[in-house]
Image (tube, rainbow, N blue to C red):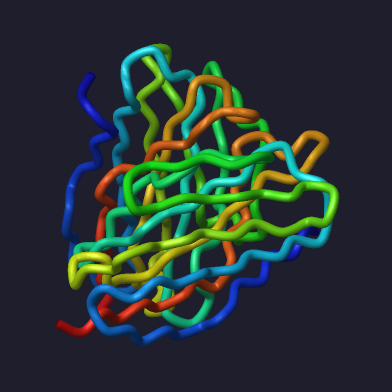
Amino acid sequence: KAGVTQTPRYLIKTRGQQVTLSCSPISGHRSVSWYQQTPGQGLQFLFEYFSETQRNKGNFPGRFSGRQFSNSRSEMNVSTLELGDSALYLCASSLVGGVDTQYFGPGTRLTVL
Amino acid sequence: GIQVEQSPPDLILQEGANSTLRCNFSDSVNNLQWFHQNPWGQLINLFYIPSGTKQNGRLSATTVATERYSLLYISSSQTTDSGVYFCAVIAGGTSYGKLTFGQGTILTVHP
């Protein structure tokens, strides 16, 4: 099976712009979770989607949003970018999002200038 | 929320040495995973181990859920083992898909 894929891999934006990141899960996986990794805060949970529904959300401002499509692919959007949004964004997929293994994609490295 | 602490924060070894990484967590968990983050940032699954013991080649892991800790053992370390090792858990209850990560152990293996 193909692994989790994320596009784009690298992105440079300026403050105030918005960005959309995409994640394609492993075939058959219905849960997709998103994480932000920064040197200062480490790996932090953004949100989780299962069957097109957001089931869980981390402590991030409303500028961070996401959605999941019927084929389980997911997108996350960050509006009004700030310098502090520069980070590695990772998505992970699993069968059901609980007592099962999460598999991570290669990540999207976002730089905000 | 649940807290995850990893120790040591940094570990420097000579090739061939053995090491033990520890992960303590503050509450009951449904899921515990160990990851190795490669230099390009990808998180590589090592173990899914909410309880018990598993082995995979030179690596093994043990989780004692009742005492809220997990150990990752690396034997006969190689330079390619260098990188950051993370422990992550999903707390019991309705924490769907929410892995909470420790701060990681940075492992450096010298030839």
Q: Residue at x 63, y 64 (%)?
A: B23
Residue B109 lies in quadrant: bottom left
Whether residue B11 is situated above or below residue A21 in the rendered picture: below
- Of the pair A91 and A111, the residue shown nearer to us: A91
Q: Residue at x 14, y 82 (%)?
A: B111
Residue A29: x and y, percent?
A: 43, 19
Q: Estimate the x, y position of residue B96 in percent, counting from the top left.
A: 67, 34
Of the pair A90 and B80, the residue shown nearer to us:
B80
In the figure, is residue B53 to the left or right of A21? right
Q: What is the count of numbered marks? A: 0
Q: Nearer the viewer, residue A84 or B76?
A: B76
Quarter residue A26 falls in: top left
Q: Position of residue A100 (x, y in %)?
A: 56, 28
Vertical placement of residue A66 versus B1, above or below: above
Say which quadrant the N terminus of chain B sits in: bottom right
Q: Is residue A62 above or below residue B78?
A: above
Residue positioned 30% across, 71% down in the render: B83
Q: At 34% from the left edge and 27% from the top edge, which residue is drawn?
A: A25
Q: Where residue B34 sits: x, y (%)?
A: 49, 52
Along the line of sight, the residue nearer the viewer: B15 or B81? B15
Residue B75 is left or right of residue B81, and the answer is: right
